[in-house]
Image (cartoon, coloured by chain):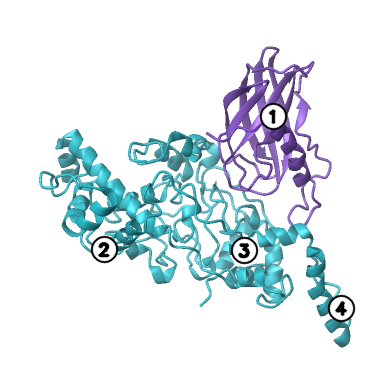
Amino acid sequence: MPNLPTRRAILAGIPLALVATTVSAGLFSQDIPENLDLALRRPTDAHHYTVAIGPVEPEVRIGRMHAWTLALADRRGRPIDTARIAIDGRMPQHGHGLPSAPAVTQALGDGQFLIEGMKFNMHGWWEIDLAIDGPAGADTVSFNLVL
Amino acid sequence: MRRILFALPFAAIGAGALAIHLPDPAAPTWSEEDLSLVRSLSLDALPPVPADPSNRVADDPRAAALGRSIFFDTRFSSNGKVACATCHLPDRQFQDDRALSKGVSETSRRAMPIAGMAHSPFLFWDGRKDSFWSQALGPLESAVEHGGDRTQYAHVIGAHYAEAYVEVFGPLPDLDVLPARAGPVADPAAATAWEGMARSDREAVNLVFANVGKAIAAFERTIAPPETRFDLWVASREFPGPGLLTTEEIAGLRVFLGAGGCINCHGGPLLSDGHFHNTGVPAVPGLPEDRGRETGALLVREDPFNCLGPYSDAKPADCAELRFMAPAGAEMLRAFKTPSLRGAASRPPYMHAGQIPDLERVIAHYVAAPEAPAGQSELRPLTLDHTQRQELAAFLGALDPLP
């Protein structure tokens, strides 16, 4: 069982992850779209929920299996503790998915969920797709991540 | 401060160039991100060998010494002629230079090098094993590799390694009551004898068999990737300018990172993502159909010697790679493990069955991006001219072990 982060640690980790994703383009990252929305907190597609995600440890290392947390709230911002959440992901420019099959393994309370089994095996643009089935119905949301 | 330090050699080179002729306007520039990416490929970026909670003797030197002896011992084979070292030759980067390896008879895959593979969550071209120790058991029971079986190996341990074994693992079971040849193998007589054994005897033999793998793994964990000219260059004062690497090799590194897209899969200090990709490698006529990781993902889940199995020393929480393994979906059809590029230039032929004889044709394969014989290739055609291809091959040569 990984050490569970405090809520403060989770919130502190999100801005760090964002900083890591906005470095200037070099030789390798020249073909990643410039206008990607890299926000890791956003409303779901049908606006039933608001979701924030972030890695437990702020530094995401390529090839290392690690945990993320997810904060789920209703449209008024009240935490939701009971929902079924499925995680998928892909590299839009490479035509392949995640190298692992991450899953929500624990509801931590206060709208927080633990996601285990996250892994990214390449630098570049990743999309993380969530399907959420909660009190307000089923909804989806996608996040962009540039590693 | 770091930026200033990097600027200094440039300034020196620039001054030298001015004294002779005007600075070369085509001299490459490196962003901080590029430089950090290049450093991430160096051996200096390789972390220590990760713990293997599934093998309690993984870092026990006595187990490594026992495993080393077994690795070279041809008594662990049906014909007394095949050891691990037969296909994993220490003076040849622990591989055999053959397209298809030859144990007691010919296999259908190329032998993989061993150095640094303790960092890899899945072993074999199809990842059908999830630990070094479990990997070592596969060839021992393969009809075309070592060709032997579990009770045979238990008898060899009892006859020749009892003292060292007992010191590391504890008492051996009573071997006198066991058949000479028995195991869940292709040989019908050995398979029948195995079925006839009491369940408790089979489990006792399985434990000895798993421990043989754990000893071999303890030895293999000590096999580290050797330093290369590239590593020395990254650590040198000239970096990223020419010095230990030539201008052509550095240009090849830029192709590797940029136009070639090699780093997509060949990243990190081992120049491998440890994952599985369909790259449209042709099938070999005459060999059985090879579905790659699609089959490997099913096999590793069912394997009694996996991280979650009864012979593993790990707790389920230690088995994240297996628990959260990507399923055997269509994407994994004919996907094979990304090999490390360390030392690759001097160990042709290439690919999982040695389909491509030399580096020039490997690069041509990636440029052309042919359709896969089954499943979908992840490759897209590249635009690399003749010079860029030569530069890329030159860079790969700088990843060879130092003589």
Q: Is B183 left, or right, of B234 in this rendering?
A: left
Residue matched to label 3:
B42
Mark 4 belongs to chain: B
Residue matched to label 2:
B73
Neighbor class of circle 1 (other Cα within 10 Å; few <14, some 14-19, many 20+) is: few
Same chain check for tags 4 and 1:
no
Task: Name the foreground residue: B178 vs B293.
Answer: B178
Q: Is B153 left, or right, of B241 in this rendering?
A: left
Q: Which hue is chain B drawn in?
A: cyan
Same chain check for tags 3 and 4:
yes
Please, which residue is most extreme toward the left here? B177
Residue matched to label 4:
B23
Q: Is B190 left, or right, of B266 in this rendering?
A: left
Q: Percent x, y for residue B379? A: 63, 50
Which chain did the image draw in purple? A
Residue matched to label 1:
A7
Same chain check for tags 4 and 2:
yes
